[in-house]
Amino acid sequence: MDIQSALFYLFSAVMLFAALRVITARNPVHAALYLVLAFFQASGIWMLLKAEFLSITLVLVYVGAVMVLFLFVVMMIDIDIDALKKDFWKHFPLAAFIGAVLALELASVLMGGFRSSQIAVDPNTANGLPVSNTRELGVLLYTEYLYPLEIAAVILLVAIVSAIALTMRERKDTKAQNPSEQVKVKAADRLRMVKMDAVQQPVVPPAAEEPKP
């Protein structure tokens, strides 16, 4: 066994352990930290496959941005663990069935790849010439997968707008307008006439008391 195979088995074992701990850890913060560990191990596997761009992107985007946001959200909100575990065993059979189906589908796809008799080709070379996998990935994204990429961008934009709208809706320190109430408003509700004197009489201060001898 060479060093590359040993690293692959090491990264895979640690990633499986971290993924298992993500769903079994009782503390949400610990689960998020185990997910960060799983992302690092997946990045190492991508690096072994000579997909440097995907490896660095996984670390920068998911570990550096998404998981930091997850940690902030988990630590700021008050999660009732007992309420979450209340119906765990009630939904466990359905969850186990769906997990088994997904595992069988993944196994069928992976086993088909293992049985393939194609000779492995170095992704960094094609016909003896150096090729950048980052360039090839960009060409695929903006040619064959352009429409799925645009759809994903629109979905992410809608998710961002929805998250902002849901966050700002119930806050008391925000100012928002309701168009339906603006249309139904009447002049009497907005303007009140008050009758007042034209000139207000000046207030005369009381005379100061003379000091007693």
Image: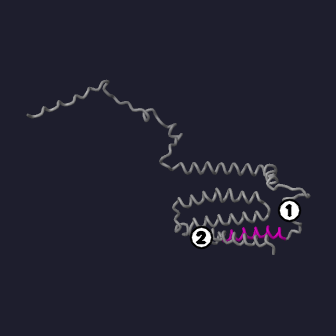
Residues shaded magenta: 96-114
- Does the magenta segment cover residue 49? no
* Residue at 53 percent of width and 48 percent of height: 169
Which amino acid is tagged 1? Answer: Asp
122 relative to 159 in the view: left or right: right
Q: Residues within 10 Å of mark 1 (few under 14, many from 20)?
A: few
Instruction: Give the residue number, with chain letter if any, for mark 2.
Output: 25
* Residue at 50 percent of width and 45 percent of height: 174
Q: Which mark is residue 122?
A: 1
- Residue occupying the far top of the picture: 198
The foreground one among 143 and 185 is: 143
Query: Judging from the image, what secondary structure is the residue with disc 2 in?
Result: loop
The foreground one among 52 and 84 is: 52
Report the label total: 2
213 relative to 81 in the view: left or right: left
Q: Point out residue 53 in the picture as x, y percentages from the top left corner.
A: 76, 57
Q: Point out residue 101 in the picture as x, y percentages from the top left corner.
A: 72, 69
3 relative to 129 in the view: left or right: left
Give the quarter of the figure containing the C terminus: top left
The foreground one among 212 and 201 is: 212
Q: Point out residue 129 in the picture as x, y percentages from the top left corner.
A: 89, 56
